[in-house]
Image (spheres, helix red, strand yellow):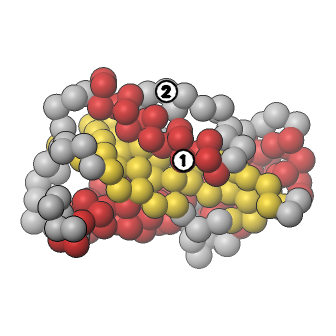
Amino acid sequence: MKIVVASENPVKVQAVEAAFRARFPQTALDITSVNVESGVSDQPMSDQETRRGAHNRVDNARERIPDADFWVGLEGGLETIDGEMMASAWMVIGAEDGRRGEARTPTLPLPPQVLQLVRDGLELGEANDQVFSTLNSKQGGGAFGLLTDGLYTRGGVYTQTLVLALVPLTNPLWAPGSA
């Protein structure tokens, strides 16, 4: 099974591999990562923009590498709800037959120090690194790991969300012609 991940971030690639291995344990996986544009801001600031970025990544990865079974777009973003900044990510999986599955991660509240740095123009990963005195946290446990003392990690949350995004593509209740 050939899977194209629309990112070269190792945390995202590993999450895709873990989700597909969990869902297809007896299948040989050929995973390719490719850096493609999201077509949205470097730091999406709404749920809608974040979701659009994940869909765009699937489209751009499919255009770049058309010979695959699945294309996976992962896009993290922020949104302000009642004055509080929250982080989440969308996972979109495009199948060879044109169907898509998608799911959103849990929503993570961000501390005021991170919020201020993001408002000053930093991306979330850079703001986290500054506040938590880390280096390249977005390729590690990310904000989830930093804020939960490792109880949750970016990769773990992404893996679980990707398994959920696979549901419409793997569950027979969504099979073409089953409605």
Q: Secondary structure at mark 2?
A: loop
Which image quadrant for residue 42?
Answer: top right
Q: Which residue is denoted by mark 2 in the rendering?
A: 37
Looking at marks 2 and 1 on the same chain, the residue that comes earlier in the sequence is marked by 2
Near-viewer residue (173 or 87): 173
The residue drawn where x is 29% and y is 63% is 168
Query: Would residue 161 be found to the left or right of residue 23 on screen?
Result: right
Front of the two marks 2 and 1: 1
Residue 78 horizontal/vertical position (percent) = 70, 50
Residue 43 in view: yes
What count of labels does the image hold?
Answer: 2
Q: Secondary structure at mark 1?
A: helix
Query: Would residue 85 be found to the left or right of residue 120 on screen?
Result: left
Where 112 sits versus 96, above or below? below
Query: Would residue 116 be found to the left or right of residue 103 on screen?
Result: right
Residue reaching furthest to the bottom? 151
Which numbered marker is on residue 51?
1
The residue drawn where x is 88% and y is 59% is 83
The quarter in which the C terminus is drawn is bottom left
Residue 110 in view: no
The residue drawn where x is 30% and y is 67% is 167
The residue drawn where x is 31% and y is 46% is 94
Q: CA distance from mark 2 to mark 1?
A: 14 Å
Which image quadrant for residue 26?
Answer: bottom left
